[in-house]
Amino acid sequence: MNTAAKMTLVIAGFLALVGMLQPASARLHRPYAVLLTLAGIAIGGIASFLLYTPLTNVFDDIVAPIVNLPFSASTFLVVFLPVLLFHAALSVDLREIAPDAAPILTLAIVAVVVAAAAIGFSLSLAGVPLVAALLLGAIVATTDPAAVVAILHEVGAPLRLTRLLEGESLLNDAAAIVLFTLLLEMLAGTANPSIAAAAGHFAVAFLGGIVVGAVGGRMFGALLPFLDGSRLAEVTLSIALAYIIYVLGEQVFDVSGVVAVVSAGLAAGAAARVRLSPGNWRYLEQVWEQLGFWASSLIFVTASTLVPKLIDGIDLRYVWLLLIAVAAALVSRAAVLFGLLPALTALRLSQRISSAYKLAITWGGLRGAITLVLALSVTENQHVDPAIRQLVGVVATGFVLFTLIVNGLTLRPVMHILKLDRLSPLNQSLRGKVLALSLKDVRDAIGRAAREYGIPARLAGGVTERIERRIEELGAAPSVEEAISERDRIRVGLVALANQERRIILDHHAQKTVSGAAVERLLRNTGVILDAAKAEGRIGYNRAARELLGFSRGFRFANFLHRALRISRPLQREISIRFETLLVRRLALDELARFIDTRLSALLDERIAGLLAEVVTNRAEATKRALDALRLQYPEYAEALEQRFLRQSGMRVLLARYHELYEEGLIGRELFENLEREHAAARRFSARLPPLDLGLRTEDLLHKFDMFAGLGETELKALARLFRPRLLLPEERVIRKGDRGNGMYFISSGAVEVLAGTQRIRLGSGDFFGEMALLSGRTRQAAVVTLGYCQVLFLSAADFRRFLKNYPAAEAEISEVAEARARENREMSTHAEADATC
């Protein structure tokens, strides 16, 4: 049997074992990693016995590839490590772990260095060479979330605790491997830097890897729109990214490839969450979950089969060294948790982490696949002393086994003792309410089904009797109103609204009724609102909602490019995105109002629902005002954009109808695929954004103004040269009532509001204001305020008088029109006073 065949057989056999053990762990309620490790050790022990026993040679060809693996640790590092790390990073949502960034970074970097130092110096006191001891410390400093997170999910541990452990394990792998690489080079004699040089190399490798990975992840996000929504292409590109970034980091840029892969996974995940359709993102997650599962499981089982070989011939000294390493690791981890994290809270860099959380994190530092593969790579390094190789292999493997078996099997009772397997009082109260409402729905559904299918009522009553008793029990428990303060109920409602708003936006994204750039902006803004609601309740929610209606720095910069450098495309893009986001946000807020009536009112009581409805109504009104201002500014574009939205909605209904007909068997597969192809082509055409004109020519504006309608072309051109462009900022008071009229304004793009007493009149592109004070010489009769960025053309009184002097015929024409308009204004004013008197 050749090497390729042996490798294929071993991997296939290990995959078969993995497939059987995974469901077994669920049935036995034991950590999967523990079962996998024990099975690997058993296979390795049995294989070694069968290969070396003089009793029989029948199984030698079968077990030899297991005892003497046909691939090396370098294969693990290049083939499996990028997949393992990229999957872990891709599954982490940066927005969710951002509030705990300070403690996570402390655990991932500071705790790794402290643990490596504590283990290294402790083992050096027991006679282990210092560099070898520090190397061993770096190897066992990495934590693996696979087993511990599975336990935390099973017992219902708080989400924050899970996020802390996941974030730590993701980033500390990168930090520990950078440190491991440096120490291995020193131990093998290929490098001998000073402490300062070593620290500098660590910083360069770590920070350089972050930069390389971030750039790669951003490029991945930029390429996604060009893949036309192909799931297979998206997954393929993501797999290629993991390996390309790893190799580029290690071989081209001389930085940490591991850190680069982690950074790329985080950046790619952040981009893919908002740029892929929800269905494609779920598909990408599922594929990577499978790949990560295979990589982690194969590393575990393969390394575990080598345990009998590694521990062959060891003495009790290794047991003593293992106990020292375990004790040093626990003490150093607890020191960081109880010593440094309170300082972060005091400096307001992190919310308080309870002592129960700290104890759970200390005990939950399980080691796994990364530790095993690093130890395996040392045992195969021929530049390292054989005694050191055996020491590292045995102690590191023993460390993994100790944490998996001792910590892993006792973590569940530890969580129970620390009372971290219970719902918070808030969630307990909500649980009762949710159960009661759900059971009522079930009861009603059973009754409808019995009537529909002609099942006797007494049988239906027998089924629903138990449900009725459970509903009564839940009704006797303290209500949500009694158990939860009004402030907490409002916070729960606001978080629910933000999550529902995100779901609505994702629905629009899936239906392709909105562009990818607008979806990205909408989701990012909704995340800001959600975080504000969690942190500050109603005050934070309202503040974030108001700020999001403002103009971003990107919009202001694009406007600067347009006004100063005549570069229009960035501003066109920003205005298009703003149109779409406001339109979809308004639709989402309408749905949120219905969501409050149908869901939240029953869950949180009518009073809280009323307060939430008021919050949503205020947001809807503010959004409508901003949208109306844009409609005034670009009326034709607004109509084209809303028509596009309606076309896309119609396309969605059409596609749903095709699917219904196909599933009902009324049309065959050939016809369905033909219709689907035709629909895809039409949908791509209708998805194109209409062009946006940022303004009008001066002469075009003058033609629209009746005061200048009678002027000839020569006079119009002369007048047009007198207008000066002027940029007005949002909410700028252009005219104050009572000021002297020093000029008139034409709105090239933008919208303003005229405040005349109790009247509010909105003017948009192509309109004008300020002309009567200019013609009559009277003071301003109303104030004018901008509703957003406005590009106007300003004609000063002095320039206007010079024009009239140079063109007497024009003066007579304009004076006649002005007198007619003045009479109309006086008549309108008289009628308004008469109506008021009546």
Image (spheres, rainbow, N blue to C red):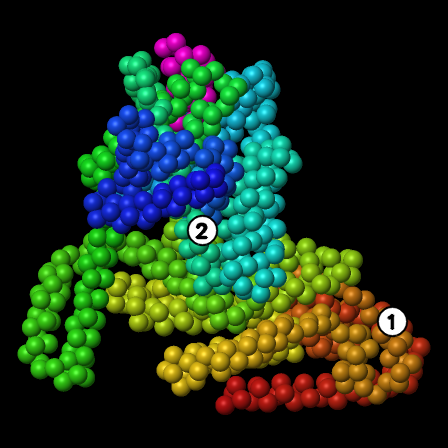
Camera-nearest residue between 684 and 162: 684
Magenta residues span 116-144
Mark 2: which secondary structure? helix
Dots 1, 2 in contact, CB < 8 A:
no
Residue 523 covered by magenta stretch: no
Report if residue 219 is visible in the image. yes
Residue closest to the far right: 806
* 748 horizontally vs 598: left or right: right
**Residue under numbered circle 2:** 288
Is 812 on the left-hand or right-hand side of 676? right
| Residue type indicated by callout 1 | Arg
- Asked if 816 appears above or below 428 in the picture, the reply is below
Q: Quadrant of residue 433?
A: bottom left
Mark 1, other Cα within 10 Å: few <14 / some 14–19 / many ≥20: few
* Image location of residue 191, percent across then percent down: 59, 19
> In the rendered image, which quarter contains the N terminus?
top left
Q: Position of residue 730 (x, y in %)?
A: 63, 62
Mark 1 and mark 2: span between their CA atoms? Answer: 63 Å
Q: Residue at x 50, y 66 (%)?
A: 509
Residue 420 against residue 187 in the figure, above or below:
below
Please tell me which residue is depicted at 19% across the width and 84% down the height of the picture: 452
Label 2: few (<14), some (14–19) or many (≥20) C-alpha neighbours in 10 Å: many
Q: Nearer the viewer, residue 39 or 275?
A: 39
Query: Which residue lies under the disc numbered 1?
Result: 721
Q: Amino acid at mark 2?
A: Trp
The vertical placement of 757 against 283, above or below, is below
Above or below — where is 200 with respect to 651? above
Instruction: Report the predominant secondary structure element of the magenta stretch.
Output: helix
The x and y percentages for residue 69 are 42, 33
The disc placed on residue 489 is none
Dividing the picture into quarters, in which one does residue 463 lie?
Answer: bottom left
| Residue drawn at point x = 86 percent, y = 85 percent | 711
